[in-house]
Image (cartoon, rainbow, N blue to C red):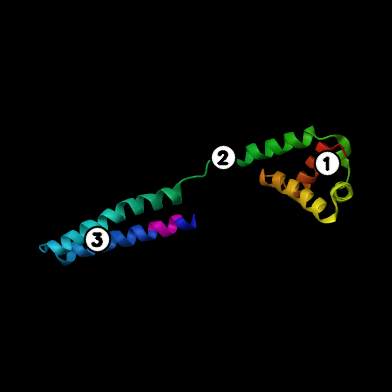
Amino acid sequence: MGNSIGVLVLGVLALLTGALFIAAGQSLEYFVAWSVLALGFALPLTALGLYGVFHLPEGQSVKERRKAKKKINESLPASVLEAPTYELYNAMLMDSVREYGPQIGWQMLERRLEIYMQTGLTRSEAVRRLAAEKGY
């Protein structure tokens, strides 16, 4: 959105510059050439800026995301839903550390959680989802 506003501002400035050149020297070919050049930059920049500012992002609506999260939570086993998140995390961390060592085990667990969080889950939901996947 920030870049779109910048492009829109540049387009409007180029448009004003072109209008100023037209007003300053209607009979001089020099000013007419510069005004055409400025307007040639102004129109696409303004259109691109307006499109970026007012174009709505595509994707799921809030209602659809809530339904998807609810569906995910309903598919988790009861043992994962009832256990506190920190206990599930610690159990997975201990297994990971035992298997891969302290640093790599922790990094692998965190990376898996980040992958789930990038899909739109909260950290707690990601821990529960990973715990269900691993069979805790």
Which residue was labeled with disc 1? 131
Q: Residue at x 49, y 45 (%)?
A: 56
- Please state which of residues 82 and 117 is positioned toward the viewer in this rendering: 117
The spot of residue 87 in percent (x, y) is 89, 49
Residue at 20 percent across and 64 percent down: it is 21
**Residue at which label 2 appears:** 59
Which image quadrant: the C terminus? top right
Identify which amino acid the numbered label 2 is placed on: Gly
Residue 29 visible here:
yes
The secondary structure type at the circle numbered 1 is helix
Q: Which residues are magenta?
A: 4-8
Magenta span: predominant SS is: helix
Does 56 lie within the magenta span? no
Which residue, given by chain and number where applicable, does mark 3 sit on? Answer: 18
- Nearest to the observer: residue 72 or residue 34: 34
**Would residue 58 appear left or right of 73 to someone viewing this image?**
left
Few, some or many residues within 10 Å of mark 1 (<14, 14–19, 20+):
many
Q: What amino acid type should be assigned to the residue bearing mark 3?
A: Gly
